[in-house]
Amino acid sequence: MDAITPPEPPMRLRDLIDAMRKLGKAMRDTGPQAAHVSDARGAALAVTTSEGAIVSMNRSAAALLGYTGAELAGKRLADIAHEEDRTDVERQLYAVDANEPFRSFDVTLAGRTGHRMHLHVYQQTFASGDADAPLRLLLFVEPLPAYGETTPHEAAQKDAYSRSIWLTRGQQRERERLAAELHDGMGQALTLIKLMVEDARMRLRRGQADDAAQLLDAAVLQIRDSIGEMRQICGELRPLALERLGLPAALSTLCRRVEQSVETLRVVLSCDVEDSEIPEHLKADIFRIVQEALNNVVKHAAASEIRIELQRDAAHLLLSIRDDGPGYDKHPLRPDDASSNGLGLIGMQHRVEAQGGAFTMNACDDGGTEVSARWRL
């Protein structure tokens, strides 16, 4: 697969968020099934050029295909398909009407293993820094089975069956992803540790105590790395702090951890909600949103203070995250920022709106950026 240089100038975060909002609205207008996402981590998203070259792809989309985002950056979507499917993929990608920036279509791509994957793609065209080089935001979904004309009762039964199939697919894919991560990461690490310990034991028997000690020290470091990797995998499935502490305490722990890792950053948390008042299905989403927002601020915002507020009124749960950095509209996104910053933010947006919430992101008048989410209770 030949690499293609990403377009210059790069995309703007405001345009990317606006494109996600338009894409989400257009998807909801097509029917309720369009709200489904393709991975337990969230929406499978990518940004491409008008020629189909991948500018950036988030972890969900890359994992769906069995790659990492870095491996796919600069490749053409048509290259991630079997030869007999490439013409159709290119035809779908080039079939763009300037008067209709949103469209949806089916493509067949190939994962790393060569397995053919039938995907439904929702696509929204949006402006880049170059008016003559628009970009496209893509969301990948594994479609549910379609049925012909049915009675309302039959339709309800088949819809329930289709959703059961979709959930089973998702569970199976998540098991495959975990198996691959455990095999490629933990499995190889444990094998290396075993070899180190065996080598150290042999050296001890030969009286080479210093060499054995060095090997054991290296094995200890490898064990520490493996523990960290295992914690990361477990945290992606369900943040452990949520189970042990509840959401307010988990958020407090997260904020303190960020403060400790960045000495020049102050994180202020104001939570006026009891854990029992927060709907169970929103807790993980809220934690992920705060986690992603903090990560983005630390990496990109050059801020000295972040204020997080979680409140409720009679009918809504309200979350806001505000920083005092220069503001997201002051600089465009570089291609290498798009996956970690831009697609992370619109992944949060999709997560909020998929639960019936409202997501906003604004540059503050006095500098900085505010990310807000609101859910009806």
Image (tube, rainbow, N blue to C red):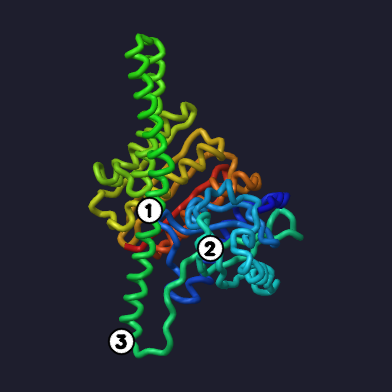
Disc 3 + disc 1, Cβ < 8 Å: no
User: What kind of residue is marked 1?
Assistant: Asp
Disc 3 is placed on an element classified as helix
Q: Quadrant of the C terminus?
A: bottom left
Label 2 amino acid? Answer: Leu
| Front position in the image: 317 or 16 | 16
Q: Is residue 88 above or below residue 129?
A: below
Residue on which disc 2 sits? 139
Going by the image, does 232 lie left or right of 299?
A: left
Q: Circle 3 sits on which residue? A: 153
Q: In terms of depth relative to the viewer, which is nearer, 95 or 3? A: 3
Q: Quadrant of residue 39?
A: bottom left
Q: Position of residue 339 (x, y in %)?
A: 56, 49
- The x and y percentages for residue 4 are 70, 52
Residue hosting label 1: 285
Q: Earlier along the polypeptide chain: callout 2 or callout 3?
A: 2
